[in-house]
Amino acid sequence: MPPQAEIERLILATWRVEQPRLMTSLSRMLRDVPVAEDFTQDALVAALQHWPSTGVPDNPGAWLMATAKRRAFDHLRQRRMIARKHGLIAGDMEREQQAMPDPDAALDDEIGDEMLRLVFTACHPLLSREARAALALRMICGLTTAEIARAFLLSDATVAQRIVRAKRTLSEAGLHYETPRGEQLSVRLASVCEVVYLVFNEGYVAAHGDDWHRPQLCNEALRMGRVLTALAPQQPETHGLLALMELNASRMAARVDARGAPVLLMDQNRALWDQLQISRGLRALARARALGGTGFYALQAAIVACHAQARGREDTDWRRIAALYDELARLVSSPVIELNRAVAIGMAEGAGAGLAIVERIAESGALNTYHLLSSVRGDFLFKLGRHCEARAAFEQAAGLAGNRREAEFLLRRAAEAAAAASP
Amino acid sequence: MRFMYIVTSPQPQIGPTPALLEAVGKLAEREIKAGRMLDTGGLMPLAAGAQVHIADGKLSVTDGPFVEAKEVIGGYAIFELRDRDEALAMAREFMQLHLEHLPGWNGTCEVRAFATQGPPQVHDIGCNAAAG
């Protein structure tokens, strides 16, 4: 690696370690989260300009903080200058500046509040889900625009624009510094959880995909999940979400074979499941339950936990899984959940019972562009010995799959069905 | 990518000052709330524990008294971070607190990456520090 790239990598790593402190201190000082984010990024730019020639300072964290604070003060001064035109006198400004609490000292007691404020601002329901995801990755995880763009397979310009627009929306709406309390809190947490889960799934679907930036999103989402449980420990859904992500991530090493092709859950080598991660997931699930959690994430985590605790297909409690899907369907009516329930019923009561549910979903037309509907249908038909129909279903599924690996897998299953169909 | 930080010192008699404990406590709180620190703890002197050895095919237990070791492990922490660079930056920040709050102390913070099972996973987000 050339020395220039080497030092840039070091600077970015150093900045990342300091990023949460910079963000929380500055947003407290400025009482404006999006502007605090700007100055946090500015400190990185300043380090990238200066450190290659001056070397990394002895105390890089202090340097970054001093740089960011100086800019924040300049910003405040400028804002006051404008305000002064409207009647504020200079003396007031000076006094106010001196009386301004030292952001570090203030932070001692309030880091939780500030982090929570970041999370809620970045994930404000006023913003689109995509904008929330981008802001959360920037503000909470300290990813750069380029990294977010790569992770979501978008251009830098698209992500940069999305972020600028989101920040402007927050500023114009006057929502740049607020913490919801009481009843508002759980409503707003739902908006946060949705974003974290979206980020996780982006990474999970792409795990070991063509671009290795994408799987990293799972780790970022897990980190945000830990942030949430540390900040809002009394909220069952944050523990449920963390449990769901930990339990799903525990299968990461088993989800693809040596050639990178996906391996279905039932065919996975369970020795490759990360038992440490499973136990963390089960702990989080127990915590969610203890807090009375029977929400969207806790229920899904309970389903995944049935798999995580089973030694194999026969050992899996399919009836409990079907019952949990039932409960989930009552909570959120969704054809995808119904499809999953069909799979569980198929395992508990036989392919015929499962197929009946799948056909009902297909008739409703709700999922006719969703490859997994055709894929599950193909699987049931195959098990029932209706190989020609199974082949057609798998081929249809392959045509609908968005991921190359998945499409290849489905075509292999179609060929398998074709071979079984011919005498 | 998971890392364990192990702090050793040849001067176990120099205990942490209240200022250091406070500074480290603040760092730990921040890192837990930032979702990066998974666990941390201080370790009691060996006298509070024991050693189980195998030598020449024989198992034996030493539960004291112990000959003072040259380097004593005082504490550990487990972090989930993106890559080795980040792990190093974190260790520097942690040791900087010792430099500021525990004058005259010598010690080492060893940074060790956890072994992972299965196919090698992608850990490094590895972007050229393009800010913005």
Image: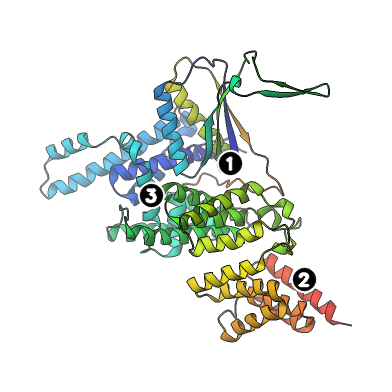
Residue farthest top in this picture: B67
Badge 3 or badge 2: first in the primary sequence:
3
**Amino acid, disc 3:** Leu
Q: Which x, y percent locates residue A351?
A: 72, 77
Tell me the chain of label 2.
A
Q: Judge from the rendering whether residue A223 lies leftward or rightward of residue A74; answer left or right.
A: right
**Residue hosting label 1:** B83
Q: Are marks 3 and 1 in contact (CB under 8 Å)?
A: no
Given the image, what chain letter belongs to the residue carrying mark 1? B
Question: Disc 2 on helix, strand or loop?
Answer: helix
Q: Identify the mark at residue A412; answer none if there is no mark.
A: 2
- Tell me residue A233's x, y (percent): 43, 49
Question: In this picture, is A416 found above or below B34?
Answer: below
Residue located 81% across and 74% down the image: A416
- Above or below residue A385? Residue B12 is above
The quarter of the picture where the N terminus of chain A appears is top right
Q: Answer whether residue A110 is visible to the viewer in this image.
A: yes
Q: Which residue is mark 3?
A: A116
Determine the CA span between mark 2 and mark 1. Answer: 37 Å
Q: Quadrant of residue A260?
A: bottom right
